[in-house]
Amino acid sequence: MASRNRPRPIRRPLINKDAGGFDQCWATLQSAMTDIHNKNASKLSFENLYRASYKITLVKRGEELFEKVKEFETEWFHKHIIPGVDELVRNNLPSIALIQLATSSSHERREAGERLLRGIRKIWEDHNTSMNLIADMLMYLERSCVETKQASVYATTIGLFRDHILKYGLKDVDGSDQPFIIMDVVIAVVLDLINMDRDGDIVDRNLLRDITGMLEQLYETDEEKENEKLYTTIFEPRFLAASEVFYKAECEKLLRESDAGSWLRHTRRRLLEEEERCVTSISNSTKDNIAAVLEKELILAKMDEFLAMEGSGLKAMVDNDREEDLGILYQLISRIDKSKNTLKTSLMGRVMELGLEIEQTLKNTDFSAPAAAGAAGEGEEGAEGADKPKALSPVAQQTAAAIKWVDDVLKLKGKFDSMLENCFSNDLIIQSAITKSFADFINMFDRGAEFVSLFIDDSLKRGLKGKSDEDAEVVLQKAIILVRYLSDRDLFERYYQKHLGRRLLHNKSEIHIEKELVRRMRAELGNHFTAKFEGMFKDMELSKDLSTNYKDHIRNLGDDDRKSTELAIHVLTTNFWPTDVMGRGVLQDGDASRSDCIFPPSIKRLQESFYKFYCQDRSGRVLTWVPSTGSADIKCFFPKVPGKESGPLSKDRRYELNVSTYGMVVLMLFNDLANDESLSFEEIQLKTNIPIPDLTKTLTSLSVPPKFRVLAKEPLTKSVKPTDKFSFNAQFVSKQIKIRVPVISSTSKVEGTEERKETERKNDQTRAHVVDAAIVRIMKQRKELSHTQLTTEVISQLSGRFKPEISLIKKRIEDLLAREYLERMEGDTAAYRYLA
C-alpha cells in the first residue's frame, strides 16, 4: 500500500506546441478580413477562421488579437474608405459650408444632398455587414470580451465608423481653414431635406430613415449606453432646434397672412405630418419631443392673437357655429393644457356676453306690436282671436318679453350643448364652465325667476294642446334645465306656486304633466321645494271626490231647488296655496280684514247646504268662500225686441255664459230688474260688497267689449267709473251659443312693477325667517362658533334655496343677539354662544 507521504515528481511546465502559431493564425484572419471587405467572403471557411480565433484566445493572446483587429480596421478606413468619403462630399456639395446650402435651388440641394446620403448609407451598410461577419468569425474572442466586461469586438469595430468617418474633418473646403465634420454635413443635409419635405417637395424618406437609423445604432462610446446614441445626443437636439426655428417663422407668417381657421387646420396637419415623419423618416422616439415643439411654436406662442382675430377668432367661431374649428381648437388646447383654462375662460366670457345681449335685446324690443309677441301666449285669459291684430296690453307685452327671454336663453343653451357634444367631447371641465356662465348671467337678470315660471306656465297652458308625449318631454326637460340654473329658488317657488294654482283651478293644463314636472323638481331640488305643490295636487284630488259625493248627496235628497244649480267645489288648504289665490291679496285701503262678497240667496242656500254636508265627517273645520278665483256657467235668456220683425233681435235668444264668480253675482242682480231699470256702480258695489278693483274688472268685461257686452253701460266708454250706470242689454247678439267672458287685465301673467316689489318684499321677509331658523339650528348643534364659521355654514345650508347676502346674515345674527338666542363670547366679540 502506497504511503500518503510519497514524494511526487516535479511537473514540468507545458510547452505550447504552437507558440509560433499566433502569427500564422493572425495572417489567416487578416486575409479573411480583407476578403470580407472586398466582398469575397463566400470562399471563406468560417469554421477554420473560428478555430484560428479560438487558438489565439486559448493561449491568452485575445487582447493582442483584439488590438490587431482594431488596427487593421483603422488602417482600412484611412486607405480605402476616407478618400472615397472625401471625394463624395466634395463632388456632390462643393459649397459645403452648411449655411450656404440655402443659396442654391431646392431641386439642386435635394439632388446633391440625396447623392451624399446615399454614398454615406452605402459605406455604412458595407461596414456594418463586414463587422457582423468579422464578429461572427471572432465569436470566441467576443465571448471573452463579455466575460471580462470590456467592449465587444462588434461594438469596437462598428464604433470605428463613428470615429473615423462621421467625426472625420474635411479640410480646405471653400478656402476655409476650419474643417467641416462629416457628421455635421450629414445632419445638415438631413435637416434641409426634412424642411423641403415640410414645404411640399418630394424627398426620399426611406433614405432619411436609413441615415437616422444609422445614428440610432451608433453610440458616443464603445460602452453603448442606451442614452448615448448619436441620434439622441447629436441629431435629435439639432432636429428640434431647427424645427423650432422653422415653425416659429411659419407661425408668424400665418399670423400675418391667414385667419384663425386656417391656423387651426394648418397646425393639426403639421402635427399629423410630424407624427408620420417620425415613423417614415426619423425615429418614433422623437414623436413626443417634436410634438412639444409644435405645441410651443404653433399653438401656444400666438394662440391669444389668433383667438382674438376679428371675424375668425373664437367669437366668430361661436357666433357662426363653426363646430369643426371649435373641435380642432379643443384638440389643440387639450394638448398644451389639461385644464383647458384658455378655452374655458374664453367660452365663459362669450356665454356671458351673449347672455347680456339677450337681456339688452329684450330691453330694446317693442312688444306693443302683436308680431313681437307671437310666442307670448294669451294676453287676456280666454279672449277670442280678433279679426285684426291689435296692440298688446302692458300685461301681454310683459308676457311676450318673458317668453322671448326664456326662448332666447334656451336657444343659447342648445347652441352650447351642441358645441359641447360635437366639439368638446362632453368634456366635464368645459361643461362645468359653460354651466356656471349660464347660471351667472341668468341670475344677474333680476326677473329670471319670474320669467322662468312664466315660461313654464305658458308652455303648460297653451303649448301642449294636441302635442305628442315627445313634445311634452321636451318642455319638461327645458323647464328642469332652467330651474337648475336659478339661485333664487325660493323666489321661483313663490311665482310657480301662484301660476300652478291658477292652472289647477282653471283646468288649464294636463294634470299628469304637472305632476311629472313636480316629480322632476323634487328629484332635482328636494322634497322641501315641492311640498306645497304636492299639497295642491292632493287638494285637487280630494276636491274632485268631494264634489262627486256632494252631487250624490243632493240627488239622494230629492231637492229640486238645489238640483237646479250644480256646484263643483275646490276645498283648498291655506298653507299650500298662494295668498292671492286664497283671497288675501285684495284688501281695502288701510283695512287688513277680508271683505266678504254678498252672494245671491240661491247661492247662499247652496253654500249652506255644502257646508252642512262637509262638516258631517269633518267637525271643527272652517270653510271660507273665495269668489275671486272661481267661475260660473249661467244660462241667459234674451227675449225678442219689440218692433223687430227680422234678424236675430226678432226672436228669443238663449246663451250660456261662462263668467267669473263675481260676474255671476253681478249678473244675477239684474234678474229682478225691469228692462228699463238700471243700477249704478255704487249700488252694485253696495249690493255685492265686491272689492272695487275686482268690481271694476268684472263690469268692464261685461259691458265694454262688443262681443261680450251683456250689460249696457252709460255712458258708453272704454273704462268703468264710479258714476256709470248699468242695465240689461236686451239687444245682445252673438254667433256663439256658449260664450266665455274674459276677465279684463287678468293678473295671472307677469306682475307689474308694484306687484313685483311686493312679491320681493314678502320673499325677503320669508328669507329672514329662514336665515333665523338656519342660524339657530346650527348654533344649537355646534354651541359655539366664530362669525366666519357661522356665516359659511349658513350659506352652505341655504344654497339649495337661495344664496343669502352676507349683510342679511349679519343683520339676522344681530337680531338673534337682541332676542337672546345667542350671546357674544367673552374676550372674542367675533364669536357666538348658543343660549338654550
Image (cartoon, helix red, strand yellow):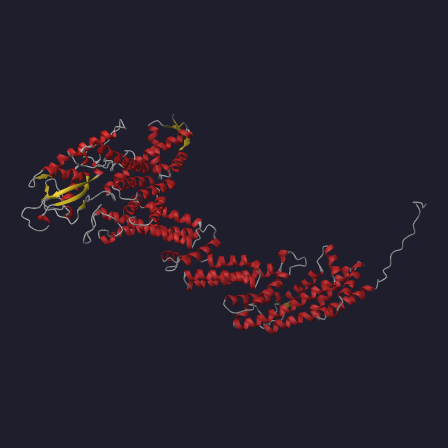
Q: Is residue 376 above or below residue 576?
A: below
Q: Quadrant of the rendered structure where residue 263 is?
A: bottom left
- The image quadrant where one finds the N terminus is top right
Q: Is residue 385 left or right of residue 203?
A: left
Query: Can residue 598 be spotted in the picture?
Result: no
Q: Position of residue 783 (x, y in %)?
A: 42, 28
Q: Is residue 217 above or below residue 174?
A: above
Task: Give the farthest residue toward the right.
Answer: 1
Q: Nearer the viewer, residue 257 or 1?
A: 1
Q: Position of residue 62 (x, y in %)?
A: 77, 60
Q: Is residue 783 above or below residue 441?
A: above
Please give the name of the residue rendered at 58% of the width and 61% of the height, measured from the top-left corner.
283
Q: Is residue 536 left or right of residue 784?
A: left
Q: Position of residue 825 (x, y in %)?
A: 40, 28
Q: Is residue 59 left or right of residue 439?
A: right
Please give the name of the residue rendered at 52% of the width and 72% of the height, measured from the top-left corner.
105
Q: Nearer the viewer, residue 421 or 753?
A: 421
Number of residue marks: 0
Q: Quadrant of the rendered structure where residue 36 is?
A: bottom right
Task: Give the farthest residue toward the bottom.
Answer: 91
Q: Position of residue 587 (x, y in %)?
A: 20, 35
Task: Give the farthest residue toward the top.
Answer: 836
Q: Is residue 41 above or below residue 317?
A: below
Query: Can residue 142 be spotted in the picture?
Result: yes
- The image quadrant where one finds the C terminus is top left
